[in-house]
Image: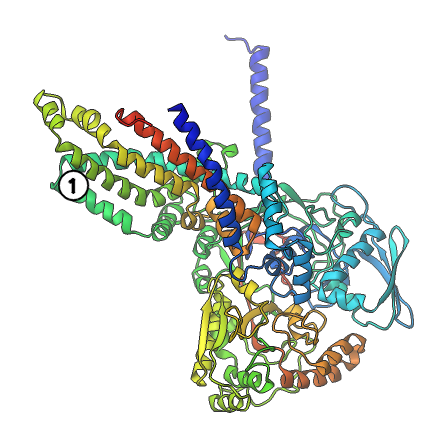
Amino acid sequence: MQSFGPARRAAVASVMILAAAAQVATAQSVLRVLIDGNVRTIDPVVTTESMAIQHGFMIYDNLFALDGQSRPQPQMVDRFEISPDRLSWRFTLRDGLKFHDGQAVTAKDVIASIKRWGARKPSGQALMQHVDTITALDPKSFELKLKREFGPVLEAFADPLNALFIMREADASSDAFIPLTTAIGSGPFKFVSEGWKPGDKAVYLRNADYVARSEAPSGLAGARRALVDKVEYLHIPDATTAVQALIAGEVDMLTFPQLQLVPVLARTPNVTVRVTNPIGEQGILRTNHLVPPFDNPKARQALLYLVGNQVDYLAAIVRQADLQKPCWAVFGCGMPLESKTGIGDWTGAANIERAKALFREAGYDGRPIIIIDPPSNDRLHAMSLVTAQKLRQAGITVDVQAMDLGAWASRRNVKNDPKTDPNGWHIFHTHGKMASQGDPMSNSAAVSTCDQKNWVGWPCDEDLTKRLNAYVATAPDKRGEWIAGYQSRFFEVLPYVPLGQFLLPLAYRSNLAGVLDGPGYPVMWNIEKK
Amino acid sequence: MIFYVIRRLLMVAPVMAVVTIVVFLLSRLGPADPAAILVGDLGSSEEIQRTRIALGLDRPLLAQYLTWITGVLRGDLGISIFTRTSVASLIGQSAEPTIVLTLATMIYTVIIAVPLGVLAAWRAGSAIDRIFMGLAVLGFSTPVFVLGYVLAYVFGNRLGILPVQGYRGIEGGIGGVLASITLPCIAIGSTFIALIARVTRASMLDVLGEDYIRTAHAKGMRVPVVLLIHALKNAAIPIVTMIGIGFGVLLSGVVVTESVFAIPGIGRLTVESVFRRDFPVIQGIVLAMSLVYVLLNLVIDLAYTLLDPRIRY
C-alpha cells in the first residue's frame, strides 16, 4: 500500500484550496448591463450625458432622492429643519456615511459638492441664485441661508437628471468645467478605475461599508442595497448584437433597446421587457430663434399645426401604441404641473392650410429649411423625417442634412443664418427625460433669457423668463395659477414644440429580481441575480 | 542593405511631420466642437463656451498644435478631452484585441487562401478552379456585417457554442481568447481569403507558364514540389504584398467587425473618437497607425529580397 506522505497531502490540500477559491470566485454575482452609450466621462457634473449620470448614481450618494411618486425624500440627510421665514434650512447627515477611501462624509464635502453642482446644473444654478451662505455647523450639519424665498429646495436637491452627487471636498473643489479624473463617492458601489476601458466597459464593486437607509426602496429613494458583488456597464455599439447578447444570456440587462427590436425581445423566453420609467420622455422640436423664418413667432406657431395630435411623431419614434402618450402640456402629462391652459386648436389632425397661412404671415420667402439630422440615433432621425415630410406638405422647401452625432452636437451651436453660413441650421430634434422636462427648474429647453447664453436655439422672451423665474417663489398651492399663466405665454412665444411623451422599455433576463421603477435612469441597487 | 534600412528609417521623420500637420488640421475641419459634445445634449451655450476655455480649445490653432507637437516629441501623445486619461494608455488598451485579431485572421487566412489559390491555378479551368473562384467571389461580395450577424446567430444563439460578442483578454486564458475571436476571424477572413486566393491564383498562373516549371516537370519532380518549391516561391511577391496590406488594414482597425462583435479594438476607438471629436485621441491613433504603415512597408520591401535574391537595395 502506498503511503500518503506529506508531499501528497500538501498537493491534495493545495488542490482543495484552489477548488474552494474557484468556488468563491464563481459564487461572485456579476450583473452585466448594456447601457445606452458608454461611460466616457466619469464626472457627472460636467455633462448632461446620460451615461455619466448613471455612473454617478452607482458610486455617489445624494442628499435627497425622488421616491416612486416623485416626492423628495431624505437620502444622506437624517433630519432637517426650516425656519419659519423659510430662509434658513438646516440639514444633518445620517450616521455611517463614508467615502470609498474610508473618510467620513462631512458637511464640508457636502458644501463643496453643492457649489460645484450649483455652477453647472440648472436646478443647482436656480438654487444658488437665491443662496446667501452655506455654512458647516459641525462635521455632520450645515445651514443653507437664502437671500429670498426659494420653495423647491428639496426638489432641487433630489433632481434625478441634474443630480446633486456628494463628492469629497478635494474633488468637488476642482474646476466645474474640467472633468474629474477620480471617482470616489460614498454610494452603494465602488468604481474600479483599473477595470475602466472607455468605449468598452466600466466596472463597479459592491461597497460593503455602505449603510443603507431602513426604508423600503421606492424610486430613487429608500434603501440602496447592492445585492450583486459586481456590476459591469458594457457598451455594444451595434443594436442587433446587443439584442443577440441579451438573448444568449451574455448580458443581463439592456437599457433602452432599439425600438424596432423590442418585439423580438418580447417574444424571447427568459427575457422580460418592461417600462420602468412610467413618465418617460418628451420629444422636442427646436427651432433656431435667431434666423428667419423662425425668428418670427408666427412661423414657430405654424409648426404647432403641422405637429397636430403628435401621433405621427410618436408612432415614428416608438411604434407601439402602448408606449405613446400624446401630450401638449409643457411640463408633461401625469406630472404635477400638467395643465390644459393655453393649448389651442392645433391638437387634432394636422392643419396644413393653417400652417401655410401662418408661414405666409411670417414672411416665409421660400428659403430651404435646414433640418440637422443624426441618422445613427433612431429616435432623433424618426422625428427629423416626420418634420421634413410635414413641412413639405405645407409647401416648404426642406433640406434634411444627415450627419454624425458629433457634427450634429457641434453644428447646433452655430448661430448664423444658413443663408450665409453653410453650417447654419433651422431645426433639430431631441428628447429629454420627463423628470427633467417636467420641472421648470431643470427644463433647459424652456429657458428663454435674451442673452444668447441659454440652450441652443436661443429663444428670447423677457415675460416668459420672468414667469419662469417666479416659479421658485411660488407656494405649492399657487402653482396651478402659475402654470396657467406660464403655459399661455409659452405657446405664444414657443421656445420649443413639445412632440408628446413616449416610454422607453428596459429588457432584462428573467432571472433578475428587484428591478426598480423610477423617474430617472435605471438603477442597479436592489437587483438580485438568481 | 543596412544603409538602405537606415535611409528608410530616416525618411520616417518627414513623413510623420506631414502626418501631424494633416491630421491636426483635418480633425478640426468643419463644425467640430468637443466642448459641445462633452457638455451634452442639454448644456447651455454659456457652459459650452466656458468649457471650451477651460480645456484650451479657444486658443489659436497654431498654439494648440505647438503644445501637442511638443508633447509628441517628448513621447507624450496628450490626454483625452473626455476621459482625461492618456492617449497612449487608451491606444494600449485597444491594441491587444486588434493585434490578436489581426494575427489570428492573417494566419487563418494564409493557411486557407494560399493552398486554395495554388490548387485553383494548378487546375485552372477545371471544376475545382471554378468552385474555388466562385467561393472567392462570394466571400468577397458578402458584407462582413451580414456574415457577422449570421455567424453570431447560428453559433452564438442557436448552437450556443461561441460567444455572440465581446473580447476575452489574454489574462483570462487562451481558451477565452480563441472563443471570442473565432467568429470575428471567420467574418473578416472571408474577404481576405477571397482576395489572397485570387492573387495567388493569378500570380501562380503567370509562373506556371514559365520554362523552368516545364523543366522541373520534365525532370520528373513531383507536383507538390514543383508547385510549392519552384512555382510558389517565384509567385510570392504579389502574395506577400497583399498579406502586408492586409496586416495594415487589420491593424488600423476593422471598424465594422469590431462594432458587430463588440470588440474594443483600435477601429472602435478611432470611430468613437472621431464621433466625439476627441482631437488628442484621433491624432494619437493616426500618428501611431501611420508609423505602423511605414514600418510595415519597410518590412515588406525587405521580405522581397528574401524571396527574390535579384532584388537589391
Chain letter of mark 1 equals B
Q: Is residue B207 left or right of residue A257?
A: left
Q: Position of residue B79 (x, y in %)?
A: 61, 45
Classify mark 1: helix, strand or loop. Answer: helix
Label 1 environment density (alpha carbons within 10 Å; few <14, some 14–19, many ≥20): many
Q: Nearer the viewer, residue B78 or A496?
A: B78
- Residues A58 and B99: in front is B99
Taking A375 as reference, is B67 above or below it? Answer: above
Residue at 60%, 45% (x, y): give it. B68
Visible in this render: residue A433?
Answer: yes
- The location of residue A107, given as percent across then percent down, is 85, 53
* Spot occupied by residue B306 in the image (x, y as percentages of width and height): 31, 25
Q: Amino acid at mark 1?
A: Asp
Instruction: Report the residue marked by disc 1.
Output: B129
Relative to A111, is A527 on the left or the right?
left
Outermost residue toward the left in this view: B218
Residue A260 occupies quadrant: bottom left
Position of A383 relative to A511 (above/below): below
* Residue A47 image point, x, y percent: 65, 58
In the rendered image, the quadrant that contains the N terminus of chain B is top left
Residue at image x 47%, y 64%? A403
Q: Quadrant of the C terminus of chain B?
A: top left
| Residue for point 53% across, 41% down | B91
Relative to B158, does residue A490 appear above or below in the rendering? Answer: below
- Image: B262 above or below A498: above
In the picture, measured across the screen, residue A182 lies left or right of residue A407, that is right
On the question of residue A203 being in view, the answer is no
Depth check, front residue: A352 or B53: B53
